[in-house]
Image (cartoon, rainbow, N blue to C red):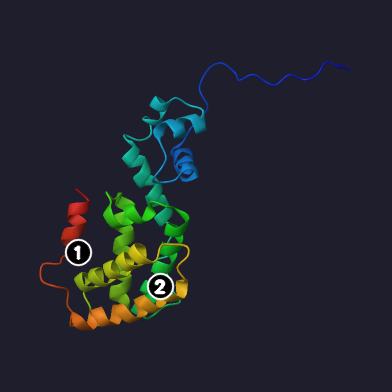
Amino acid sequence: MNTTPSQPRKRAVGRPKRLDLGSLLDAVLHFGLDTFTMAQIANHLGVSEGTLYNYVRSREELRGRTAARLLDSIDTVVDSSDDWINYLVEVNRQLRNLAVENVGLSSYYLHGPYRPQTIDLFDRIVSGVVQRLPHSNIDLAFVLASHASTTTLSFFSDIDVDERIFRRVLRSTLPALNEALDGAAPAGVSWAHVVQVARQ
């Protein structure tokens, strides 16, 4: 029997530890969407900063990919809601919770630049409104959905704000906005144009 104390294993010489994009995104969440640096991510993962650029072109791309992955967790189907107002309240409740937990997500959601999967998310939300709001069209649904998310993230993404207030505000302002618009989007509003520009 060997009685010598065991020595810590030295790292084998050769290829660096294997990385994948998911590890980078997890590391961004560890440090925060708005505050991480590429040096922090590299140090955290035990690789050189240059290695990160094998996976992303820039810090902005890494930030966008991380935010887009977070937003992919939003349930845009919401089978339990046949009413367009309740639908937008529920989608924005999920959005608000993500924004409370992840500082910087609000900025990405409101200002971009957007990843393709985020545009797909927006499209699913807008389509969800169209399905639930009789006699609506995609442009009006875009205006209503934009109002809901802008209101939610601009005024109610602080953890100290009671969720009941956020729900009451959306439930009162959304029908008022729809009525004020008389069931039509303002002239010049085009969801198809927004998508086309965002995908360029």
Look at the image and tell me in which quarter the N terminus lies. Answer: top right
Residue 189 location, x and y as percent?
15, 67
Secondary structure found at label 2 = helix
Callout 2–callout 1 Cβ contact below 8 Å: no
Residue, disc 1: 191
Quarter of the figure with residue 75: bottom left
Extreme-front residue of the structure: 160
State how far apart marks 2 and 1 are (Cα). Answer: 26 Å
Q: Is residue 63 above or below residue 192?
A: above
Quarter of the figure with residue 138: bottom left
Q: Which badge, 2 or 1, is on the more N-terminal residue?
A: 2
* Residue at 30 percent of width and 61 percent of height: 122
Left or right: where does residue 61 sit relative to residue 73? left
Left or right: where does residue 111 sit relative to residue 50? left
Residue 124 location, x and y as percent?
32, 64
Does the image show residue 198? yes
Q: Is residue 134 above or below residue 19?
A: below
Secondary structure found at label 1 = helix
* Residue at 42 percent of width and 40 percent of height: 36
Q: Nearer the viewer, residue 131 or 177?
A: 177
Mark 2 or mark 1, whichever is nearer to me: 2
* Residue at 19 percent of width and 70 percent of height: 139
Residue, disc 2: 166
Residue type pointed to by label 1 = Trp
Label 2: few (<14), some (14–19) or many (≥20) C-alpha neighbours in 10 Å: many
